[in-house]
Amino acid sequence: MSARLPELRGEKVVLRPFAPEDITTDYVGWLNDRHVTRFSNQRFREHSFDSCRAYLASFEGTPNLFVSVRLASNGQAIGTMSAYRNLHHNTCDVGIMIGAREYWSGGYGQESWNLLLDWLLAREPDGGGVRKVTAGTLACNGGMVKLMERSGMTREGVRVAQEIVEGEPQDIVLYGRFA
């Protein structure tokens, strides 16, 4: 995105660029919590402060975004989002992790998702906007499927039995939304 992510504020959450000071014990803990990452390939890695700093550094000089999801009420970090932009096709693949489990099922992820998608899709392409946002998840991740569908995304495809979760093959479902 040619423009830097501004602070995006909703009723429940604030989105802002993830910064080095956001790499905290809580953040590293979310990534190492097998319940938080059970539907993510992050579950196969052991995360450290160094691996998290390297991941953050991977965004420097790219059109991609790494986003901190924070409570609007007090600024507490509760999760992250990523947005990987393909400049050739003017598309963006988005992901989310609400790592603070006490905020699951409370609408925090949905509001975060909607804020970022609306911001990406509403802007002119020359200003960093995109023509299409995509995302995918394991079909067994019902919360994420609902989140994508409630945001106006349309199911575009399925990768049948693509990954193994808890010993069982699972489909990956792919979603998209145009500007």
Image (spheres, rainbow, N blue to C red):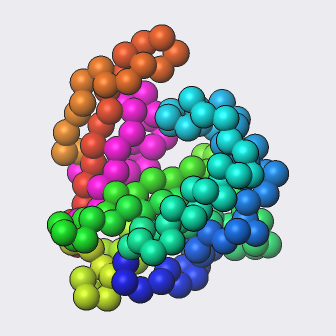
Q: Residue at x 55, y 38 (%)?
A: 42
Q: Is residue 151 visible?
A: no
Residue 50 pos. (x, y %): 71, 52
Q: Residue at x 51, y 53 (%)?
A: 96
108 sits left or right of 178 in the view:
right
Residue 11 pos. (x, y %): 61, 74
Residue 165 sits above or below residue 149 on the image: above
42 is within the stretch colored magenta: no
Residue 98 pos. (x, y %): 61, 51
Q: Residue at x 68, y 41 (%)?
A: 47
Q: Which residues are magenta?
A: 132-154
- Quarter holding residue 92: bottom left
- Quarter holding residue 162: top left
Q: Quadrant of the C terminus?
A: bottom left
Residue 96 sits above or below residue 58 on the image: above
150 is within the stretch colored magenta: yes
Residue 14 pos. (x, y %): 62, 73
Residue 85 or 155: which is nearer the viewer?
A: 85
Residue 65 or 148: which is nearer the viewer?
A: 65
Q: Residue at x 47, y 20 (%)?
A: 165
Q: Disc count in the image?
A: 0
Residue 164 or 174: which is nearer the viewer?
A: 164
Q: Is residue 54 visible?
A: yes
Q: Quadrant of the N terminus?
A: bottom left
Residue 155 or 166: which is nearer the viewer?
A: 166
- Quarter holding residue 161: top left
